Amino acid sequence: MTGTGVWVIGARGNVATTAAVGARAVARGATDETGLVTARRPVADLDLPDVADLTFAGHEVREGSLVESARALSEDGTPAPETVETVADDLRAIDDRIRTGTAVNAGEAIADIADDTADAERSLAETVSRIRDDYESFRASEDLDRVVVVNLASTEPPTADPERYDTLSAFEDAVAADDPDLPASSLYAYAALKGGHPYVNFTPSSGSALGGLRELAAENDVPHMGRDAKTGETLVKSALAPMFAGRNLRVMSWEGHNILGNTDGAVLEDERNEAGKLESKGDILDSILPDIGHNRVRIDYTPSLGDWKTAWDYVHFEGFLDTEMTMQFTWEGSDSALAAPLVLDLVRLVAYADRRGEGGLQPHLASFFKAPLGVEEHDLSRQFETLDEYARERRSEVSAGGEQ
Amino acid sequence: MTGTGVWVIGARGNVATTAAVGARAVARGATDETGLVTARRPVADLDLPDVADLTFAGHEVREGSLVESARALSEDGTPAPETVETVADDLRAIDDRIRTGTAVNAGEAIADIADDTADAERSLAETVSRIRDDYESFRASEDLDRVVVVNLASTEPPTADPERYDTLSAFEDAVAADDPDLPASSLYAYAALKGGHPYVNFTPSSGSALGGLRELAAENDVPHMGRDAKTGETLVKSALAPMFAGRNLRVMSWEGHNILGNTDGAVLEDERNEAGKLESKGDILDSILPDIGHNRVRIDYTPSLGDWKTAWDYVHFEGFLDTEMTMQFTWEGSDSALAAPLVLDLVRLVAYADRRGEGGLQPHLASFFKAPLGVEEHDLSRQFETLDEYARERRSEVSAGGEQ
Amino acid sequence: MTGTGVWVIGARGNVATTAAVGARAVARGATDETGLVTARRPVADLDLPDVADLTFAGHEVREGSLVESARALSEDGTPAPETVETVADDLRAIDDRIRTGTAVNAGEAIADIADDTADAERSLAETVSRIRDDYESFRASEDLDRVVVVNLASTEPPTADPERYDTLSAFEDAVAADDPDLPASSLYAYAALKGGHPYVNFTPSSGSALGGLRELAAENDVPHMGRDAKTGETLVKSALAPMFAGRNLRVMSWEGHNILGNTDGAVLEDERNEAGKLESKGDILDSILPDIGHNRVRIDYTPSLGDWKTAWDYVHFEGFLDTEMTMQFTWEGSDSALAAPLVLDLVRLVAYADRRGEGGLQPHLASFFKAPLGVEEHDLSRQFETLDEYARERRSEVSAGGEQ
Amino acid sequence: MTGTGVWVIGARGNVATTAAVGARAVARGATDETGLVTARRPVADLDLPDVADLTFAGHEVREGSLVESARALSEDGTPAPETVETVADDLRAIDDRIRTGTAVNAGEAIADIADDTADAERSLAETVSRIRDDYESFRASEDLDRVVVVNLASTEPPTADPERYDTLSAFEDAVAADDPDLPASSLYAYAALKGGHPYVNFTPSSGSALGGLRELAAENDVPHMGRDAKTGETLVKSALAPMFAGRNLRVMSWEGHNILGNTDGAVLEDERNEAGKLESKGDILDSILPDIGHNRVRIDYTPSLGDWKTAWDYVHFEGFLDTEMTMQFTWEGSDSALAAPLVLDLVRLVAYADRRGEGGLQPHLASFFKAPLGVEEHDLSRQFETLDEYARERRSEVSAGGEQ
């Protein structure tokens, strides 16, 4: 299978850069697929598009080049400098396919870091139209079977009263009325779903979560999923919290303190954007541990850490005979190295679903997200089980049926 | 439902003492059931024997009294002194039902701490016979529906070549021949299963794990399960390791360092006994993470910690693009407060199974054990799921069928 | 030597309660002097007032009783319930000597928790006068040689432009003019120094730090010292930071995250009060590590922790050949158990200085404080050395001279 | 000042390699002097030999080259690959000056890793003579003012009954008698002191610690110091333990657990060699905290960590009112990056002392060592103070006197 395009919103950000470097490094045999969920069985048994066959492009509001971004990331250790040089020509080819994006209604913090945007003096409808043209031109010029749109842009502030966009007609009215609250991420998602392109929202921004866009995806039978990829502290929480629940241990306090030093951290310093982030993080514990007493998550900007995200979590819990006990953990991970393979996983899996005609939300992808759309289950192992069952079922269909 | 006896091997040890104090404190309304798996839904929906209706008794090789043991534990914070006083009379009543046990072939470390044993100058057959009499007298004198035997004695050294006891006849021949390698824990188990008493092995000792005893349990249709209750560091491992596996992150090293200060710790200082402990701990990671590079568990004796078991684990793993990352956690738990409710859970669940005629191994109890007999699955969440499914199925039977 | 009174501002707070319980428990032989700096040599060699001979009294704005406060603290583990009962009568005797205090200009958070204050409808001059009367009545009625006033009240917001009170006359003019910015802590200090009572400021509030009050202390030759006792995370910092400095390791980031659940924590949630706290914490690292890149301290309120203060510090530093390394620590301490003995130490040492006629600032007490008045040295070991030298010099004088 | 030679025993080990790379990188402006104690004031004010002017050579028993060693270290992150290339020619020049060393009586673990040694079929006297020739040839051929000998070889097992070498004549008799217990490290030290070369023992091996060699150093007025450089966990301990002592907090248990993956770790797996290491580590806590209850240090070999040494320390202590509290820290440092600058510091400082005629032990260098010869003080800050005083005194002499 060939011909899958990956259109990345935020195409030169850390995660986007690492995903592109990694995919091309895999293609050139310079690294292996460690960290890809789709490289382990039973998911690896599906007939997914090869990592080497993905073609990257995207929107960006900051100047620069992928090679520059990759070299800057190298300073923090990942990817290795020699890997960047190995794929440098591939990155330059991707750069040629990157178009100027929009930061309309994405908040001041993002506006501040934007060098150029494609929305000035345009109506929302014109902006959407231009985005759709960008998607289509990419597909046509690269002769691709399909284009998956992935949102990797910096987190926007939360959208107030999102229920006002609960129907497609309400959403489209808002576009027509140049509604100043409609965030960029949802415009990108709208353009994708409208054009029949599978869509993945890797960030906490609104994206395709609005009711109107879910309606559109169902109507057009386009696969989409989100939101907020689960890469670090929250991933650990979703693995650990079920232990306390299953053993009937009462969590009195769960303090999570994250420090990080990349662009994401700088953007999160803007309090409204942080609010967007913290909202989806908090949900997990409240869902798995409904009786939790105190649950706080902090994210602070610590420049020297660069792309390394360090989290300290402190869990104060009560067991039998009113005994108070504690657990704490420290997680030190490269945000990009953890996130990038998931981007490739998601692209492969939604492309696969699209080929099979499995449109709408993709609940078997819940394990990838902090706030999986349409899924209540936050227990990581059970989420993995859903994915594995999906894979096993598809495989057995194929074995039984012949072609896929 | 009334009339369940709990016969504890090691009846005045820390876990046994805490279980007895806790059960009586629940009965007297001095504490709640936090920490009991059987107190959360859907397991709580089963018609289990009430905690308040359990009658305790057992074997012990050390002198002393339960009240003394409980007060000594209070020094470390659990149970609270006022709780001990509330149940002091109940503890004295249990003490009256405690008989002198055997430490035959249990290793030197245990022999050293034994004040008195019932095996001197007796053949193994006589020892077994005496144990069976103790079980039966308890049932008769207390007029109990059933007696569940629970092994809480200190860990024995591993049994060499356990496969020589793979059949019931081989086991019984060994008893008849006074085989000096047959450990006390298996004699207790044999006596239980022979007499039709459900049996739980909470420790890493052999207990009912020998093939011959599994055969006996199946033949007599007696429920039994083990071994090595999962209360602290290993519990956390079984929750966390699936995260690395599911995300295809390669664990290069997993170092576990445990320090504790109770009798268990002192016994574990004897190297052969430690070998018995470490064997079952190591298995979990090797099973969940077959590609793990380095996996070491240490247990050290740190007297000042008393009953508090502290573990530090350091996980060095590799993700995408060969990026090396780390996670570490510290777990500080009261061993007894974590273990005691599980004793009550297991007694309730095997008593329930016995009443329903569900003999043999109890795989739905895997989540309670580091080395669950007959179960390959070590993912904690999936083990919980098996238990919850068992509970939901039994409930729906009842709802469908009427009485139970 | 007998007859030292301890007048505590905030007399029923956690630290005050623990200090009173502890002093009386020492007096009654129910505990030892572990944790008292004055109980280790060479400081113990000085002829200090005995802990058993201290008489407690004080001001308080909250209702309740010391016995109640002590029992509430017991819930968190310190002091032990039996210790509280041992000294309960002593505590009641102290309660009889506690007078209603003032919370004038102490900030809204403190005003909110105050049940009663002695400042309503009084001028500042009248308030001061009343405070002085309270001090004097205590001395007279208990027939004491001297009274040491110790500020243990909750932290006030920082005083704006403290340099406007840089002279005694400016300060006294402000009192006369009912200046609404003069905080309660400085009024208490003024009353103490004016009346010749040694004064210790255990908190970050202004207390005797204002220039005018230093002038008054020097003029009247009254010993005083402060401010902000160094009990937990900052204590560790002052021990660790010199290691980085001495080895010429460049600290790029030092993140400190404190969580605590006592009244202090609740008051600190009020942002202005937190500002007061963080100001003195930050100074230490900036002083010891002038080239530090990033230095943040957070204090969060986590109710379940009660009086236990937990800190996680993460140090990101650079060594030779641009190598980035990390150190992190977690500190879990009972705030009151750490602070209370220091209160007794400081009372004993300033009483001693007062008897010897050593008025003014007491730089040899720098090790007790986060922001020691008049001292630039923040290296903990060097601060201890100053104290030890002071003790050795006084002892050798005595040995040489005869009486003391 | 020019002309200082550095003769390294274990010349291609990790620390030796990093020191050589670092010195040449400083010389070529490719890195700065962060991590050098001699680069901070007041030590930096002394007229020390420049780092750029040090000439390296040494003994080695393993094959290979410095460039290979440096590249292997680069895999673990330090030094950076580009730094290695910058100094590659310098490293090759050093390689040409490296001679085959001896591993006589250095234990089996070291013998196992040795590729070639210069002691086979030679008497100890001949071995010493050959070593002396190597030192002298280096000095002569490079026209150096002086040669400092530094022991960086892997740790030997402890020397049994070291007091039998308490006099120079006893030592020399043992050399003459081919005593099979005389370890290589002491033969190297003997050769150095006999030839008038300043000597530094960076390792826990015997080196110049034997009484007979101290006598020789004093007699010949040659500066020497040791032993066991303080680079990681013990460094932190020597900074933290004085905090507990100064505050009269009773340490009940101090557990130290070290994991590392370099050659040192592999050698330490040999139990006798580990004994040598642990002996000097333990001393520090026992000295600073004479009442410590339990003090254990473990060192385990964890291959994936390479040159990164990770330590977890857990401190269980008691404060006022019998309150039990805890502190724990994790230290993650590159062993070589921490040790290498200290090698350069010690060479510069003993060369300086030698030039000034300050022979014998160098107690002002205590801060560099876990077991400083002739020094009882283990408080890190006070050790630094001794060094700083030394520097200030020498500076003021110079200022006062003119010449230096």
Image (cartoon, coloured by chain):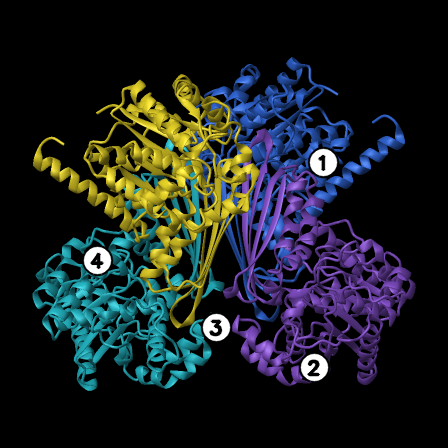
Chain colours: A cyan, B yellow, C blue, D purple
The residue indicated by pointer 4 is A386
Q: Where in the figure is residue A106, as x and y percent of width and height?
A: 28, 64
Can residue A208 be seen?
no
The residue under label 3 is which amino acid type? Glu
The chain to which mark 4 is attached is: A
Q: Which mark is residue C360?
A: 1
* Front residue (pair B255, B171): B171
Camera-nearest residue between C1 and B26 = B26
Helix, strand, or loop for circle 1?
Answer: strand
> Which numbered mark, 1 or 2, is in the foreground of this view?
2
**Gap between marks 1 and 4, in whole Å?**
73 Å
Q: Which amino acid is tagged 4? A: Thr
User: How many numbered marks have been drawn onto this rendered protein structure?
Assistant: 4
Q: Quadrant of the N terminus of chain C?
A: top right
Residue A128, by quadrant, is bottom left
Front in this rendered view, residue B167 or B34: B167
Badge 1 sits on which subunit?
Answer: C
Mark on residue A75? 3
Which mark is drawn over residue C393?
none
* SS at circle 4: helix
Q: Nearer the viewer, mark 1 or mark 4?
A: 4
Q: Position of residue B207 (x, y in %)?
A: 38, 40
